[in-house]
Image (cartoon, rainbow, N blue to C red):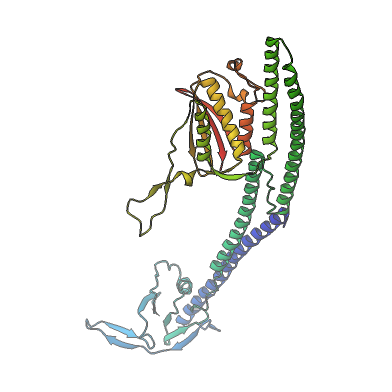
Amino acid sequence: MSLRRYIIFALVLAGFAGALVAGSWYQYGLARERHLVIAFNAGIAAHSLATGQSVAPLPFIATPTNPTEITSVDNATRLRFTGTESLNYETSLSIAGIAIRIYSKDLQYSLSEIKGPAAAQFGQLFRSIATFCGAPLIFLETPSGWQRLTAPKLFSCQAAPPDWRTPILIAGFILLATLLTIGLGIADHLSAQAAAITRRAKDGRTTPLPLKGPSELQAIAKAINRFFDREKLRHSRRATLLLGISHDLGTPTQRLKLRTALIRNQELRQKLDADIDQMTQMIDSVLAYTRNEMDVEEMRKIPILGLLQALVDDYADLGRPVKLLPFQPPAIRHSKSVFSAPDASTRAASAQESLFCNCRPNAIRRALTNLVDNALNYGKTATLSLSATPESITVFVEDEGMSEVDFTQLVEPFQRGKNARHHRGTGLGLTIVESIAASHGGTLGFSQSPSGTVAAFQICR
């Protein structure tokens, strides 16, 4: 279904729900007021009957009855009417000298608000009785004796107008909940699409956006998929061209290397060899950068701690001052049960549980090697440490260098700091590291510590 139809359907449904609830409230109000007006008129008719005036037809049934007098233990005399033995409550009153008895099983009526002329008081009394579902028995004293008034179509529970407000209100809430569900579903689709677009733009993965939700959202996802695929193809072609050029430059540099060996001037030969070595290093750096940009390596799940330990061991074999600080696994909270110990709310995770990462191992090793080499070249030592969260892993490389440089500029291609003039390099090392981090959904950051510079290499798990 299209988003336009969703909106139209939601508006129609909301309007129908509102009209249904408002209409039921209005219709019940009219029916109730009509019912109470009939009860008020019946009260006026009862007043006419009690004063001996002829009223035809009566809106109730008047049956003559003869009550019996009973005397209580305190010599008080009261009337007992037939059929009232099972009724628990009696309301006695007199309006303009006319005696009235009302018997009910569950209700005792409040008559404090009955005011005005006698006929109006009778009307208000009957209106008050009709307000409640009590099925009372009414006895009225008339000039011809006591009359039993029965009005099953006026005072019974069945006589009251049906109240459909609660079911219709529930139906209205259900309709509104349906609208809310539809609206939240569309919002969830939009949020999921935005997250997928952000994730794909961040890490450059080729996973297509899901085609879910209304047709308009599916059309947006298709257009974005085509855009990403086109950009991926264009980027891959440029990387392939750069890779081919860099690869083809390798052959002439090797020939130059061989030919310089024939030069008898040793000083000139050493300068040419240094230039050729710099060209070769630059070609290798460009090849490494383009291979990473083309994502030629498959993703694998590896223990990142083992990769770091192997890297540190390789440098240790060469006698380089590189060390890895012990990893402190984070505490994992778990829910308690009736079988758990009272204080067993957390437990320490092992390195195997915390440090598995889905990544490109060779690319990660290349990035860390570049960071360690930079630390050794410009900071004398390299100290590695890491931290882990359920979403990411961060490797910290700390050295002893305190130079103030703008690292945001050094991650750009072929940019080198002022302190790099005495060290061999091409200016692509940090560019490659930043590209590898971005391809894994992470970042590369730098900060200053009391002892030197810290490079933070973060990747998503």
- Residue 162's quadrant in the figure? bottom right
* Screen quadrant of the N terminus: bottom right
Residue 185 appears left or right of 253: left
Residue at position x 43%, y 85% in the image: 148
How far from the left and from the top, in percent, is residue 219?
74, 49
In the image, is residue 429 above or below residue 338? above
How far from the left and from the top, in percent, is residue 460?
57, 41
Front position in the image: 173 or 186: 186
Front position in the image: 400 or 77: 400
Front position in the image: 279 or 254: 254
Q: How many marks?
A: 0
- Residue 235's quadrant in the figure? top right
How far from the left and from the top, in percent, is residue 375?
53, 24
Residue at position x 52%, y 29% in the image: 315
Front position in the image: 343 or 256: 256
In the image, is residue 79 above or below residue 292? below
In the image, is residue 71 above or below residue 268? below
Residue at the limit of the structure toward the left, as seen here: 74
Residue 24 appears left or right of 323: right
How far from the left and from the top, in percent, is residue 392?
54, 41
* Screen quadrant of the C terminus: top right
In the image, is residue 70 above or below residue 106? below
- Residue 257's quadrant in the figure? top right
